[in-house]
Image (cartoon, rainbow, N blue to C red):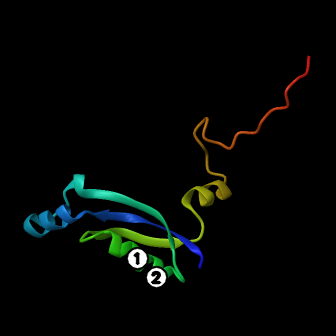
Amino acid sequence: MPQYYVEGLFINKQGVRKKQKTGSYPANSIEPYAKTIWANNPMEAIHLASEELEGGEWIEGPKASQITEEQRMRSQGAPEFPGFSASQSKPKKRK
């Protein structure tokens, strides 16, 4: 069974209730979702992620892939913050 990285934005259960009353999403109820899920196919991974929302709703996504966002950005050569790159050890000088 392969692992899938499911990512997206959702509003929590309280945000869904407030949306039904006021008609708009409260900003403090929007949350990111990023988890690794073991599933047989991407659709099953998305279904399992949707069940984990426990009454929440997807706003953006969900997107299931076998490559993490970090791996995708590194393969494109996107700029990185200093100190976050994979460090390469320098050979120590002997005295």
With 27 as the anchor, is 53 left or right in this view? right
Quadrant position of residue 55: bottom left
Counting the numbered discs, the total is 2
Locate residue 15 relative to residue 44 in the image: left or right.
left
Q: Residue 57: image x %, image y %?
A: 27, 71
Q: Residue at x 34, y 70 (%)?
A: 52
Query: Is residue 74 toward the left or the right of residue 15 in the image?
Result: right
- The dot on residue 31 is none
Name the outermost residue toward the right.
95
Q: Residues within 10 Å of mark 1 (few under 14, many from 20)?
A: some
Q: Nearer the viewer, residue 38 or 6?
A: 38
Q: Which mark is residue 44?
A: 2
* Residue on which disc 1 sits: 48
Q: Quadrant of the C terminus?
A: top right
Outermost residue on the top side: it is 95
Q: Is residue 18 above or below residue 43?
A: above
Q: Secondary structure at mark 1?
A: helix
Q: CA distance from mark 2 to mark 1?
A: 6 Å
Q: Is residue 39 above or below residue 6?
A: below
As displayed, is residue 5 above or below residue 39?
A: above
Instruction: From the viewer's side, name the closer residue of 58 and 52.
Output: 52
Quarter assignment of residue 93: top right
Foreground: 23 or 17?
17
The quarter of the image holding the N terminus is: bottom right
Where is residue 42 shown, x and y percent of the image? 51, 80
Q: Quadrant of residue 68?
A: bottom right
Label 2: few (<14), some (14–19) or many (≥20) C-alpha neighbours in 10 Å: some
> What residue is shown at x 65% (from left), y 57% (from top)?
76
Q: Name which residue type carries label 2.
A: Glu
Could you say where residue 49 lies in the image, as x and y percent from the top left?
40, 72
What amino acid type is highlighted by mark number 1? Leu
Tell me whether circle 2 and circle 1 mark residues in contact (CB < 8 Å): yes
